[in-house]
Every structure is written in C-alpha cells, then in structure tokens.
Amino acid sequence: MKKILNDPGAYVDQTLDGLCLAYPVYYKRSAPQARVIVRAQPKSAKKVAIVTGGGSGHLPVFTGYVGHGLADACAIGDVFSSPSVDQIVEAIRAVNSGAGVLLLQGNYSGDNMNFEMASEMVDLEGIETKIVRVTDDVASASADERRKRRGVAGLIYAYKIAGAKAESGADLKEVAEAAQKAVEATRSMGVALTPCTVPAAGKPTFTLADNEMEIGMGIHGERGVRRGPLKPADAIAEEIFSLLLTDLPLSTADHVSVLVNSLGATPLEELLIVFRYVARRLAELKVQIVVPLVGRFATSMEMTGMSLSICKLDAALEALLKAPCDSPFLRI
C-alpha cells in the first residue's frame, strides 16, 4: 500500500485537523478532538439546521459541504464507516437553534440505524428532527424499490437545495420537503476502473483487470450491474446516460443540472470529455443544462472512475439550486 499518511489509526483525526487548519474561516470542530465539524461563522439565528454525516474517505462528501447555504454540521465516522450515535447527537446539539434539525444522509444501513437512534435521543430533549435519505444510485435497486437505493453524488443536490431552503427562513417541514423533492428528482450511476485501498485494511477493496471496468460500482466497492472490457469515453457516457434517462425520462424544454464527478483519481480532463458528450446528447433532446458541475464532489479514496448525476428541475428547485452558497468545495 502506498499512501501519504502517518498512522492508519490517526488517518481521520489528522485529516480533520488539516481541514480545519486549511479552511479556518469555514470549519471548526464542535469540541477539541470531536469528530464533528460545524460552521466556523455564526449561522442565521433561529434557522432550521442541517446535519449530515457519514464515513471518511469520500471528501468533499460529507464534511466539505458544511457552509452557508449548505449543511451546518457533519458527524464523521472512520473510513467507509458510519459516525456513531453519540457523534450525530453532538452535531445536532451543536447547531440546534430551536427551529428544528434536518438530518440529511446517504441510504446505508449503519447510517440509517445511527441517525434514527440519534433522532430518538434528541427528541427526548425537545429537539425536533426530520430525516431525509438520499437514494440516487440507480444501479443499487430497481425503480420499484427506489427506497432501497444507495446515496452517492446526488447528495450534493440535496445539500444545496435543502440548504438554500433553510437560509430562506422556511420551517423544518418545508426544508425536509425540499430535500426530499431534490432526492426524487436526481439519478446517478458510476463506473469504476480501479479499486481503492482503505488505510486500516492495507489492501484493495476489490480487483479489476487492467483492461476492465465495472458499471454501477458503489462508492465502497459494492458490486455493479456489469463488468466488461474498458470502452471509450463516449461509449461509457452513453451507457450510463441511457440508463439514467430510462429511470428519469426527459422532455423537450426540460431543465436539468448535470454533475460529472471524479471518484478520486480521475482527472478533470477526462470528466470534461464525458460532460462534452452528455451536453451534446441533452442538446439533441432540446433539454437545457442549468448549473453544470464537473469535478471532484464525492469520492471513494483514490478510486479511478467517475459518476454521472442528472437532477431534473422545476422552477422551485432551479431557484434553490441557483441561490448563493459558500464552502471551499462548492460556491454558487
């Protein structure tokens, strides 16, 4: 294993130290050594707070999207592991201003259990919460079982839209509804070309031959929908694009946002080649792209590969997507 680290056991905490030192205007820990990151600048008084969380190894998700117009706090677990119930409770308490707290998370079993338990615990303290789970990965379950789908890069749309709604002064029910509407409007799928290595494990999470790719691979190495020979960029983009549109039909004059995301090691040049193809296909359908996002937004350590997300926008979602936000990893 070749990684730039000190002790695998200190990987997460030293990452958080570096994050807060690099971006002190944006981030701070809720308490010394806590694995909870909160906004460094005071948030609006009596605003619905948004708390997220998940395993390390996916930066900028989850921690990077704490900021104005985004989340207010993030609880961080070990690499590819859920944060603990206590960490989530601490995050909720740190940012609760009395207007309620939206818990916004990816749909994974450990996260589901721990966020539910945290919600129940703070309810006893009089803190109202609502939970929205992001389920955008079409490779992980059929359309009939959408509630079972994983949350992947589509989390960014949920953060952005819920964050803008909260900043507008909306109440907890309205913020949760906006987040859920963003989830329902978003579909994602990825392709992996190489595995990644979890520091504590010291070996790749799966194996792929040099000439192979896997369509639909999950961000923790979960099995995809098809493994086969590596194809040219346009062929990969077409396969994923067609699968997404089967699940999310588009019509002439629709507005969408497109996110082409690096899973870690894939360079921006290759992402732009994919975006070029998707933009051309959407133009053929007379669909307008709004707020395109191309870059590293939700990773899987150093995995080589990319994911494509499409968020179908109505006027309300588009306005929230275009509203200002500010973090080191997303600014609009």
Image (tube, grey):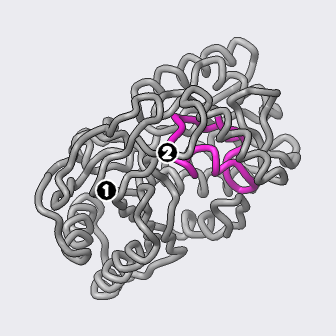
Res. 143 visible in picture: yes
Provide the residue designation for mark 2.
Answer: 3
- What's under tag 1, amino acid-wise? Met
Residue 83 numbered mark, or none: none
Q: Residue at coordinates 26% horizontally, 71% vertically from top-left? A: 237
Residue 189 numbered mark, or none: 1
Q: Residue furthest left?
A: 228
60 inside magenta stretch: yes
CB under 8 Å between callouts 1 and 2?
Answer: no
Closest to the observer, 244 or 318? 244
Answer with mark 1 or mark 2, whichever residue precedes in sequence. Answer: 2
**Quarter placement of the C terminus:** bottom right
Q: Quadrant of residue 32?
A: top right
Tell me where the magenta segment starts and ends, as one range: 49-74
Q: Residue at coordinates 57% horizontally, 40% vertically from top-left? A: 5
Q: Is residue 215 above or below residue 319?
A: above
Q: Residue at coordinates 16% horizontally, 57% vertically from top-left? A: 212
Where residue 238 appears, as percent x and y from the top left, is: 22, 72
- What's under tag 2, amino acid-wise? Lys
Where residue 161 appears, as percent x and y from the top left, is: 59, 56
Where residue 306 appears, as percent x and y from the top left, is: 36, 61
Closest to the observer, 66 or 160? 66
Q: Residue at coordinates 21% horizontally, 62% vertically from top-left? A: 243
The mark tally for this picture is 2
Q: Helix, strand, or loop for circle 1?
A: strand
Closest to the observer, 312 or 217? 217
68 inside magenta stretch: yes
- Say left or right for 109 vs 83: left
**Quarter placement of the N terminus:** top left
